[in-house]
């Protein structure tokens, strides 16, 4: 967020930028800134608008559904170091940073973000959780002085990112819970070897000839594919390895680990049943927040994608071939060959990043492989519209409308990233994109601002989006906290980060309702209903992130007392 806090890296007296924590949030540093291996199972989870949204949509016909009614009293603002919920709801911590996953020594990473629940039958399944970053002070459990940022610590930093794949089952009370430890649990980390590249860039000079990569890092949002695997999105990889395309400097990680920056910034597929991973270059390389799948009317697979960096673009991918519900996981090939489109939101058109259709690309000798690696450059050459950090995207299964968080959308003027006259340091908006003919495969659309940040709407710095019913949008906020909170800061006015619900219709339309308040310096991420819809699982990410030493911990959540804070996944349920 704009100039509110100095980057931790700025305190490091070295020519190498520290990759830890601050780079995880470009807003804080730069901005003033499904299921199964068989065709039968895939058929049971047919790809359709309603299937896709049903992954987190509440069904009022289920009597135990957490959101059978949106009947809570919105919370007051809070600066307390706890998860606050409306009367009638409670929460339980399911898993925290450092938890033992298996007897092989794998542990739950830090900064848990995207969550997916994949049932395998009625009472077993997989939980996937992304790990986005960490703080040096938490790795060390001591002040992060430059002399302590050694190769060993950088190695642990890479180990803390990626994702955790954890068995889940129903317990004696019939409630879904993780199985810890379990020999089938496994990790993806920044050190995972031999992750194959797929698509046009694999093995080309743009990847320095590589057919595989080492590790996956900066894993933010994600998706469940229509064939029941996971997509984990590599987002702020520039903070880990730098990014020559954007002129980002090398980091301390580069000093100790010689890995090409171009090997990071992709959508990575994980098959929980086999433990395989793939980096799909055909979907482009940028700060991938997440992806939302849909099908074009002609059956091709579509994926909506945002690039979470200031003045970057909104994209969609359309596969060359059609989705085949009977083909199961072999549908993966749809992510190997297709076209990336960048949005011109001023003219309402999708521009194909295809050198046979775009003269600037042909003139600059951009072949398909290079477009998949230097996607941002190609997008700018072709007229993509820059935005204020396109983050979480979701799609309304009923209407087909696509909602996009523009986290840093300016408060007052599209030309001013910071307006010194605005009442508080506040930004962000939620945009709405309607495809022509309600066809995800359309090349024309309308684009509008659905909800602006402001004290009148209650919205600030929106990040993850999901529909809990077709008429209720759930929104996670992501802004920086300060203790004590400044009276004119976002944190002072809105309290700690929020999980809110915004009705699309009715008397409360146009205003968010506060459903949950996070512990100090934490944000909520990736809320998702359990398959029985009785609980909402959500990440509580980076409590106490501004802490600099054991003596100055800003948060002790969830353990309390003098404990170190720990990012955790929680389950929210109604009191019985
Ligand atoms: Fe990792 Fe854009 O939030
Ligand atoms: Ca996010
Ligand atoms: Ca975030």
Image: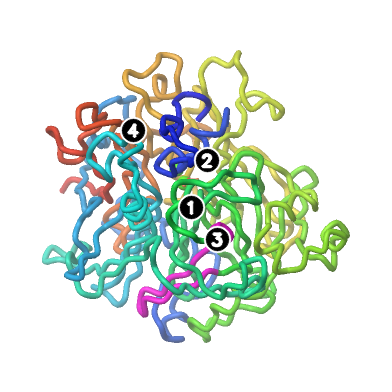
Apparent side of residue 86 relative to residue 368 in the rendered image (left or right): left
Residue for badge 2: 505
Q: Position of residue 214 (x, y in %)?
A: 45, 67
Apparent side of residue 530 relative to residue 220 in the rendered image (left or right): left
User: Tags 3 and 2 in contact by the CB under 8 Å rule?
Assistant: no
Mark 2 close to ligand 2, CB under 8 Å: no
Mark number for residue 521? Answer: 4
Mark 3 close to ligand 1, CB under 8 Å: no
Residue for badge 1: 254
Residue 62 in the image: above or below residue 104: above
Mark number for residue 260? Answer: 3
Q: Secondary structure at mark 1?
A: helix
Question: In front: 230, or 1?
Answer: 1
Q: Residue at x 49, y 47 (%)?
A: 471
Q: Secondary structure at mark 4?
A: loop
User: Tags 1 and 2 in contact by the CB under 8 Å rule?
Assistant: no
Looking at the rendering, the quadrant in which ligand 3 lies is top left
Alpha carbons under labels 3 and 1: distance apart: 9 Å
Alpha carbons under labels 1 and 4: distance apart: 29 Å
Alpha carbons under labels 3 and 2: distance apart: 48 Å
Q: Residues within 10 Å of mark 2 (few under 14, many from 20)?
A: few
> Of callouts 1 and 4, which one flags the residue occurring earlier in the amino acid sequence?
1
In this picture, which residue range is highlighted in magenta? Answer: 261-279
Q: Position of residue 92 (x, y in %)?
A: 19, 48
Apparent side of residue 77 relative to residue 290 in the rendered image (left or right): left
**Which mark is in front, 3 or 2?**
3
Q: Position of residue 27 (x, y in %)?
A: 52, 35
Q: Residue at x 40, y 16 (%)?
A: 486
Question: In front: 182, or 188?
Answer: 188
Apparent side of residue 70 relative to residue 403 in the rendered image (left or right): left
**Which mark is in front, 1 or 2?**
1
């Amino acid at each position: 967020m704009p100039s509110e806090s100095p980057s931790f890296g700025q305190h490091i007296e070295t020519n190498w930028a520290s990759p830890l924590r601050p780079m995880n949030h470009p807003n804080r540093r730069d901005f003033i800134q499904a299921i199964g291996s068989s065709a039968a199972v895939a058929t049971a989870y047919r790809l359709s608008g309603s299937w896709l949204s049903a992954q987190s949509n509440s069904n009022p016909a289920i009597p135990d559904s957490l959101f059978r009614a949106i009947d809570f009293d919105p919370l007051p603002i809070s600066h307390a170091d706890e998860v606050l919920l409306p009367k009638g709801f409670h929460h339980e911590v399911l898993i925290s940073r450092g938890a033992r996953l298996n007897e092989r020594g794998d542990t739950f990473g830090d900064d848990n973000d995207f969550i997916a629940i994949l049932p395998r039958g009625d009472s077993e399944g997989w939980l996937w959780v992304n790990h986005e970053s960490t703080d040096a002070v938490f790795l060390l459990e001591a002040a992060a002085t430059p002399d302590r940022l050694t190769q060993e610590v950088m190695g642990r930093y890479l180990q803390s990112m990626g994702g955790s794949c954890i068995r889940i089952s129903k317990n004696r009370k019939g409630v879904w819970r993780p199985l810890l430890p379990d020999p089938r649990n496994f990790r993806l980390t920044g050190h995972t070897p031999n992750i194959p590249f797929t698509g046009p860039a694999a093995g080309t000079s743009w990847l320095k000839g590589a057919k595989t990569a080492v590790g996956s890092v900066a894993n933010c949002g994600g998706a469940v594919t229509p064939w029941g695997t996971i997509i984990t999105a590599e987002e702020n990889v520039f903070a880990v390895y730098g990014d020559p395309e954007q002129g980002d400097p090398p980091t301390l990680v580069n000093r100790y680990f010689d890995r090409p920056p171009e090997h990071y910034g992709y959508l990575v597929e994980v098959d929980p049943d086999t433990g395989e991973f793939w980096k799909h270059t055909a979907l482009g390389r940028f700060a991938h927040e997440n992806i939302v799948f849909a099908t074009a009317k002609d059956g091709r697979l579509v994926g909506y994608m945002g690039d979470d960096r200031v003045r970057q673009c909104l994209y969609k991918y359309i596969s060359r071939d059609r989705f085949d519900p009977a083909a199961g996981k072999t549908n993966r090939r749809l992510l190997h060959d297709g076209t990336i489109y960048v949005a011109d939101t001023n003219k309402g058109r999708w521009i194909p990043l295809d050198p046979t259709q775009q003269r600037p690309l042909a003139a600059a000798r951009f072949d398909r492989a290079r477009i998949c690696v230097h996607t941002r450059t190609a997008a700018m050459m072709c007229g993509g519209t820059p935005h204020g950090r396109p983050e979480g995207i979701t799609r309304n299964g009923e209407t087909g409308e696509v909602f996009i968080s523009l986290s840093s959308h300016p408060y007052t003027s599209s030309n001013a990233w910071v307006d010194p006259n605005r009442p508080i340091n506040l930004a962000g908006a939620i945009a709405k994109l309607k495809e022509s003919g309600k066809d995800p495969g359309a090349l024309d659309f309308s684009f509008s601002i659905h909800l602006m940040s402001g004290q009148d709407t209650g919205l600030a710095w929106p990040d993850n989006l999901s529909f809990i019913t077709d008429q209720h949008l759930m929104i996670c906020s992501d802004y920086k906290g300060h203790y004590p909170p400044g009276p004119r800061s976002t944190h002072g006015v809105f309290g700690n980060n929020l999980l809110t619900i915004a009705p699309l219709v009715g008397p409360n339309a146009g205003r968010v309702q506060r459903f949950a308040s996070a512990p100090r310096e934490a944000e909520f991420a990736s809320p998702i209903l359990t398959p029985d819809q009785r609980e909402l699982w959500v990440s509580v990410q980076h409590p106490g992130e501004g802490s600099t030493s054991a003596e100055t911990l800003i948060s002790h959540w969830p353990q309390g007392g003098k404990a170190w804070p720990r990012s955790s996944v929680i389950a929210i349920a109604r009191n019985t």
